[in-house]
Image (cartoon, helix red, strand yellow):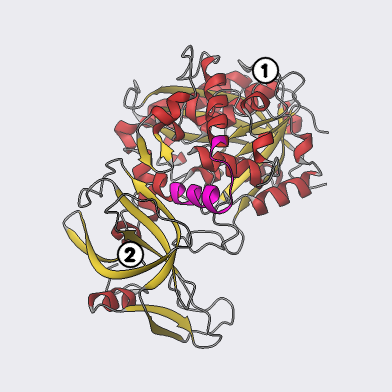
Amino acid sequence: MHPLYGTTAVAGIDLRQYRRGASPLPEQGVLVEAILAACADACFDPAEVDGFVSYGDDKNEPVRLMSALGTRELRWSTTIWGGGGGGIAGAFGLAAAAIISGQASAVIVFRALVEGSSGRLSAAVMAHHLNDHMLAAGVVAPAQVCAMRANRLYQHHKVPEGVAAELVRASYYHGARNPDAIAYGKPFDPDQIAASRWIAEPFHLFDCSRENDGAGAFLLVSAERARDLAQPPVYLLGCANGAEKGWGDLLENDDAALYPTAGFRPIARRLFAETGLTPADIDVVQLYENFSAQGVASLIDHGFCNYENVAEVIRFDNLIAPSGRLPVNTGGGNFAQGFIHGIGTAYEAVKQLRGQSANPVPGARLCLLAGGPGAPTVSSAIFGNIVP
Amino acid sequence: MSMSEGIDAPYWSGLATGRLLLPRCVGCSRWLWPAVSRCGQCGSGDIAWTERAMMGTVFSWTRTWHRFALTEGLELPFISAVLTVDDCGIRLLGRMDDPERIDPVIGEPVHGRVGMTEVAGRSIPTIIWSRG
């Protein structure tokens, strides 16, 4: 069995989320509160945390958190490379790597984002990649890069554009029923998508995730230790991170077959091979959707459907809890739960497996967390409330 | 790093004189883009910057309507595209004329001319592509 399989577990979680620009505290303050609350959730002494992992160019270097947290000794302080959200699931793999190799024993996975402290996320992500070739073409935002890939997916590979709206609608359906979501209590009419203003064709405003302030924190410990803590353990069963040849930061020169994908083909191959699981074993998916088409491409890459049958699988009725066969983004996802660089999708993965989701999937045991699609390096993970 | 110092400096100096120069591995004849210092396929470090005509086909495109920061020099909406250059297969990012607001078609032939994009007080040469 692969060393990551069921050997570590999420023992404590917290997410605090505010409207963009409305955080009551600076970024580091919100993050410290989230970490303390995640430890409290597990009944774990925060001073005992000895490792930290983030992704997406988070600006909060862990050593600077030590005073506020009372950290006794920092032993693992790392981040997944990349400016986008592609690394979110990989961050859990990196934390687990520290624990199973004995380099740390209690690791916090986190992401914090407060506009007043760090500026706009979209600008920061793009600054990671921008060059004169892009600037000269007027390509300055993630939405535009993803839009070009979406047009290729729809126009060349003939994926029906309507499936994207099904996905958006499912996220808003769940968000409207989640008291912690930005869309809570707001009815959503799918016609709103096409009626909203253009951003970059084929994307309307509602095809795009919109930023929030906030922070999310997850306490990862060994599976054995997690069983002695306050919450039911949510086990990490597998994690893969990276990119294959023909994909990456290539000035749009990715291999033609990979260009319209979200970059997850090698990730899904490894993740399922190393866990011995298949897409059919997955009970619920938390899907990072920066943009609607990339969410669709991610589901295709992970083997839930293909270019031919995508419209049969990515249907609103099939994507919603409790009745759909492929419930996706049961908290509302980045679109409707809120967007703190995707950390909310990991939060919902744990809530769902603890049976604490606002939109519970009956009997859910396994949850796939798919990281930021379309990023030069991407990652995914599978969590379980059992180790099958 | 300035345009005259980067590994793709010959591309920019070529555009400044109205020519499209692209890097090709002398060892195995592969076209290499983005520009690199070594061919990862054959291991050669011998790269020849070779002229190609500004002719190609549309690989993909988007028409931008939102005023993103750094696009202030462009009139909305504008088309950004990925174009496959004929006789080499390299794809370039560029802009496309959009006078009639007719959607580009993937695979349709285009020809380019050198233009400029104003970005935050800087003029960056770029190829502007037209149908036919």
> Which is the main secondary structure of the residues drawn in magenta?
helix
- The image shows residue B35 at horizontal and vertical percentages of 43, 73
Q: Which residue is mark 1?
A: A360
The residue positioned 65% from the left and 23% from the top of the image is: A317
- Of all chains, the one bearing label 2 is B
In the foreground, A113 or A270: A270
* Segment colored magenta: A146-162
Residue sitting nearer the eye, B16 or A25: B16
Q: Position of residue B71 (x, y in %)?
A: 25, 49
Q: Secondary structure at mark 2?
A: strand
Q: Is residue A208 magenta?
A: no
- Residue A97 in sight here: no
Instruction: Give, as a three-letter code, the residue at label 2.
Output: Trp
Residue A245 position in % (x across, y down): 60, 64
Instruction: In the rendered view, tell whether residue A184 sits above or below residue B96.
Output: above
Compare residues A256 and A334 and report the one nearer the observer: A256
Q: Chain of mark 1?
A: A
From the viewer's perspective, is residue A53 above or below residue A286? below
- Residue linked to disc 2: B129
Can you tell which of label 2 and label 1 is closer to the viewer?
Answer: 2
Furthest-left residue in view? Answer: B121
Is residue B101 found left or right of A315 in the rendered image?
A: left
- The image quarter in which residue B21 lies: bottom left
Q: Is residue A152 magenta?
A: yes
The quarter of the image holding the C terminus of chain A is: top right
Gap in angstroms between the C-alphas marked 2 and 1? 51 Å
- Which residue appears at 33% of the width and 72% of the height? B6
